[in-house]
Structure formats: C-alpha cells, structure tokens
Image: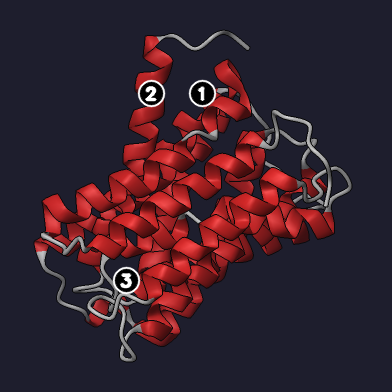
Amino acid sequence: MRNPKSLDYFLLVVLSLLWASAFFNIKIATYSFGPITIAFFRVFLGAIPVVLLCLVKKIKIEAFSKDWLWFASIGFINLVIPFFLIAYGVQKVQSNLAAILMATTPLSATILAHFFTENEKFNLYKTLGILIGFSGIVFLFSDKILISDENIFYALSILLGSTCYVIGGILTLKISKKRNENVTASILIWGSIIVFPISIFLEQPWNSTPSPDSMIALLYLGVFPTGIAWLLRFHILKNNGLVFQSQVAYLIPIFGVILGFIFLNELITSKVIVSLLLVILGIYLVKRSNKIKVTSV
C-alpha cells in the first residue's frame, strides 16, 4: 500500500459521489419503473464492466463452480434484496433521507460482527458510536414533516436494506480468499439470474412507458454507481487499502443530502442536519475504535 496522494483523495471523492448519486437517480427511476425492475437493471448493467475487467485481466469467474450456492446466496442477500428495498422505500421517501438511513451500514456491521466474528467485539468506542449513530436515526424518524404514518414503512424498508448489505458482507467472509473481482462478478451474475424472472413475472417492465429521465436514471444506476463504482473501488483497495477506502462512509450521506437538494429540490430540515451529524459521528467513533485499543465492554 502507498501513502495517499492528491489523486487518491480525488478518486475517493469521485467514488463517494458515484455511490451518493445513486439515491436521487433511484428516485427518478421510480417515476416509471417498479422496484424489482430497478434492482434487475442495476445488477445486470453493473455486471457488464466487472465481467469485462475479469476477461481483460484473465481472472477466472467462478459463478458456476462448486461454490455457486455461496455466490447465489450473497448475490440475493447483498444485491437483489437491498436494491429492491431501497427502490421500494425511495418511492415515498426523499432520496436524501435514504442516503442517511443507508449510512448506518457500518453501525449495523459492527453489531453483527460482534456476534458472528471472533475479533470484532464491542469496545467503548464502538458502543458509543453505535448509540450515537442510531440515536441520529431515531431523531430522524421524529421529523414528522418528512416521515409520517403514511411513509414510515417505506423508510424502515431502506433501513432493512442496509442490514441486508451487512449480512451479505458477513457471508462474503466465507469466500474471502477469492479475488475481489471474481467474487463481485460472480454475485452480480447470480443476482441478475435471480431477479430477472421475478421482474418479468411481477412487473412486466415491457408494459411501462418510461419517461426519458427515468430511462437515463436507470441506465446511469447500472453503469456508474454499480459497475464503474465497483471498478474504482478495486483500484482504491489495491493502491491504498481498506481503511482508506472505508472513508467513503463519511462522504456518501453528505453528498446524498446535497445532491438530493440540487437535483430534486428536496427539503432539508434542521432534524435532517442533526441526524446526519450524529450518524457521521457514530461512524467516526466506530472506525476510530479500530485504531485505538480500548477496554472491552
């Protein structure tokens, strides 16, 4: 690993923007497409650049090897379900709220890692981070201007989607010795195979009359925040490591709120700002705990 240079920080910001831009584009896509169809195109279009990378680098794709069940399970839990839940929730919830809710992924990961891994137990900083971060989410749900009885279920579905990301990440540990590109390509392939017939059966996307904006948003979602963002993630991981790459967790919710305001004129209330700050502080404390040895609780 090398010490980060200006270009590395620039690429980190680009990666954050790509992932953050997914939320307002999902919102635009929901104007014409159902959440299952959105999930399919994200996975299918996202698979193309990753598979091409594997072919160029001559990396064997093991999607249909003896470990196919692991790839299929991870593809379903880590891609299909969260992509569907996020798109489902964003139908009735502002995209900037989705960005904040999805930012809880590192906090949920810390909780599940305590129970399902050997060396990721709670300590003082992690406990404080989890409590502060999720207090921000509780505070966000108290904003009756943006979250009401009519859309609270949709907001909760986004929160559940973030948890599915974490569960899929834990399952990925079972095949962690395989190359990142191979694993990503394999789970994207299986995700496409699983969600395609569901989309055909339940939503019949060919019957829709999508607007140009929704079409562009759907194509963008598959190619940029899914496919190209993963390739950029590989580049950053290879050159700078996981700790450096994980800093996107701070930037994604910030950019998500800003982009939602710029492109969709979404309302930003004082509770949104406070919730955002609490979640970011919670993430910071959780990540700080990995650098400082503190007393376990």
| Label 2 crowd bin: few (<14), some (14–19), many (20+), radius 10 Å | some
What type is the residue that disc 2 sits on? Leu
Q: Amino acid at mark 3?
A: Val
Identify the residue at the far bottom of this view: 149
User: Eyeballing the image, is 9 above or below 50?
Assistant: above
User: Which residue matches tag 2?
Assistant: 11
Q: Which residue is mark 1?
A: 235
Evaluate whether residue 180 shows in this view: yes
The residue at 32%/52% (across/down) is 22
Report the number of numbered marks.
3
Where does the image place residue 77, in percent across and percent down from the top left?
A: 62, 65
Chain-order first, disc 1 or disc 3: 3
Residue 83 falls left or right of residue 224: right
- Quadrant the N terminus occupies: top right
- Is residue 84 visible to the viewer in this orientation of the structure? no
Secondary structure under the numbered disc 3 in the rendered image: helix
Q: Which mark is residue 90?
A: 3
Residue 286 spot, x, y in % from top left: 63, 44
Looking at marks 1 and 2 on the same chain, the residue that comes earlier in the sequence is marked by 2
Q: Quadrant of residue 27?
A: bottom left
- Asked if labels 2 and 1 touch by Cβ distance under 8 angstroms, the answer is yes
Left or right: residue 252 versus residue 283 is left
Picture coordinates of residue 169 (x, y %)? Answer: 67, 52
Element class at badge 1? helix
Q: CA distance from mark 1 to mark 2?
A: 9 Å
Task: Name the residue at 46% across, 53% down.
Answer: 279
Q: Residue at x 68, y 61 (%)?
A: 167
Residue drawn at the location 80% of the way across and 35% of the way down: 177
Q: Label 3 to label 2, Cα distance in Å? A: 27 Å
Q: Look at discs 1 and 3 and give the one toward the viewer.
A: 3
